[in-house]
Amino acid sequence: VGYPRNMEDEILVKTGIYSQLSTNDTHLPTSWNPREKYNYLGLSNNNLRVHYKGGPGKSHKDAASVRANHPIPAACGIYYFEIVIISRGKSGYIGVGLSDNSVHLGRLPGWDKYSYGYHADDGKVFCASSNTGEPYGPTFTTGDTIGCGINLIDRSIFYTKNGIHLGTYVCGISCQLIECLLVHRIVGIAFKDIPVNMKLYPVVGLQTQGEIVEANFGTFPFKFDFPSLMAEAGAEVKRSVLSYPLGDSEAKWQTKIHKLVLDYLTVHGCSKTAESFARCTGQELKEPVSSIKNRQEIQSLILSGRLHEAIATTEARYPGLLDRHKELLFRLKCRQFIEMISGADTSALISEGSCSPYGRGHPSSSSPRPHSSSGIYSGSPRRVYVDSPALGNDEQENGRLSNGVNGHSLQPAEEECAMETTQLTGLPCGGNRVAIENLLAFGQSLQVMLQEMELSCQKKSSLQTQLRDAFSLIAYSNINSCPVSYLLAHQEREEISLALNSTISSSLCLPPKSLLEVALGHVDVCMKVLTEHSVGSAGFIDIESLLEQ
């Protein structure tokens, strides 16, 4: 079970540095860990600044390091951080790099196995050796910014100095030539073949008095153009995916795609579109058109906010279904309560005896639906159309939306008659006293219904939270800008609509999900498994963007 990200994690994701990270259990290094440092070091400035407070620094025994608070997640693809040298101190024995959490912290980075470091005093890189390093780059001192990155695709580590990717350093070359190589970006890497499945942490080490450094883990802009490096790597991964050869001929793939599309249209109740597509591609529908239309009509009612009619229609056409799925019925009723407050569903508010969640009736196609008021918020009534890819609407004519249901069309909510009494701006149900009383009674009976349901503690707690949030809407004069305004989002209607549609399909021995959605779900799980096994390229795979190609 993952814990919510802290604020720094959110900043790194939202600023686009690691926008591919979307799961709440993926943490990023955001500061130094005060519990993972040698006692010769001190931390300050929100655990970003490190200063040396140990011995004279004459031997390796005076060295000290500190690790970051989280390991680098493989889902990053490429990870990068920077260290600003505030003061080189007495001797400038400073090391910047990566290590796993088994490495002793009384050493500089690179002196032990599974530890990698670039050192300020001699410009060498070290790995599992405290005696001799390999020449790599120039030395660095006070005022310099040293960046360290790991490419989890090719398993290599690289460094930058003052915003420039470091070139390969060769002994005996003049400093002028080194700077020339840097300016022309003749890039090289410090370490290759980093072991897979090893969790590495950013690390910095100091050894002499007066040494002070400060880290930037991406909360602030880097000196190095890291976003461009990420974009280039992502584009290369995408090109390799799109150019991957297909085993079958194009005709066979086209046939498979046609089957996936028709299955999707059928499962989601797009009756006319499914009929037309089946005809054009020479396929047969696996479900009667009348059955598809029944599900489509119920989805249309939910997506237009008319939950009272949707529930009644479901019970009329699929008797006993909601009795067997009490939790789903409760969620539908909670959604109905929200739509009653918003003004999208007022039929239950002024229908005699319909204020209880257990009260049931059959919708009449010949009876006009009561008029929607402006609801709890002030302003003009909203137009409510069913306009969602989940439905695949087939017609929209003269302000009415037809969904292939015989003689039944969904009208904009504002076209219907208003409640009889004068509406009071900002009051629930426009101030209609009878409607308000029915609303409150409906809410109270929802609470009773929840108490009578036999559910696990975890499920009941989740439903109680949903009900509490729904009740909260009554307290606000402007529900569009209140803390629980997310309940009014169209996505909330879509979720409950999909849940009911899946339940109906299962009751008819039909697939609850389309093959396309199942396939995409498999791909999503596959990507997670790949990142768990440190396959860095998986961090650059965005299924939605690939489908847009």
Image (cartoon, rainbow, N blue to C red):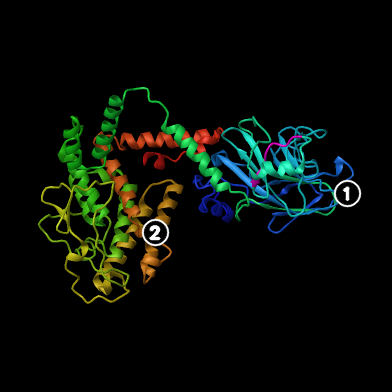
Quarter assignment of residue 479: bottom left
For the residue marked with disc 2, what is the amino acid? Tyr
Q: Which mark is residue 55?
A: 1
Residue segment shown in magenta: 164-170
Task: Give me the residue at 24% from left, 54% from top.
Answer: 386
Q: Position of residue 196 (x, y in %)?
A: 61, 31
Q: Which mark is residue 323?
A: none
Q: Quadrant where the C terminus lies?
A: top left
The local secondary structure at tag 1 comes to: loop
Q: Is residue 98 left or right of residue 476?
A: right
Dominant secondary-structure state across the stretch colored magenta = loop
Task: Give me the residue at 62% from left, 45% from top.
Answer: 80
In three-dimensional space, the C-alpha distance between marks 1 and 2, rounded to whole angstroms, equals: 57 Å
The local secondary structure at tag 2 comes to: helix
Quarter assignment of residue 194: top right
Vertical placement of residue 358 versus 121, above or below: below
- Residue position for label 2: 486
Q: Is residue 476 magenta?
A: no
Q: Callout 2: 10 Å neighbours few (<14), some, many (20+)?
A: some
Give 254 or 388, whichever is nearer the viewer. Answer: 254
Task: Give me the residue at 22% from left, 44% from top.
Answer: 295
Decide which of tag 1 and tag 2 comes sooner along the chain: 1
Task: Give me the residue at 26% from left, 28% from top.
Answer: 255
Residue 1 appears anywhere in the view: no
Q: Is residue 407 left or right of residue 256?
A: left
Give 541 or 89, whichever is nearer the viewer. Answer: 89
Task: Please state which of the two labelled residues, at mark 1 or mark 2, is closer to the viewer.
Answer: 1
Give 185 or 457, whichever is nearer the viewer. Answer: 185
Vertical placement of residue 249 versus 116, above or below: above
Q: Position of residue 424 (x, y in %)?
A: 28, 76
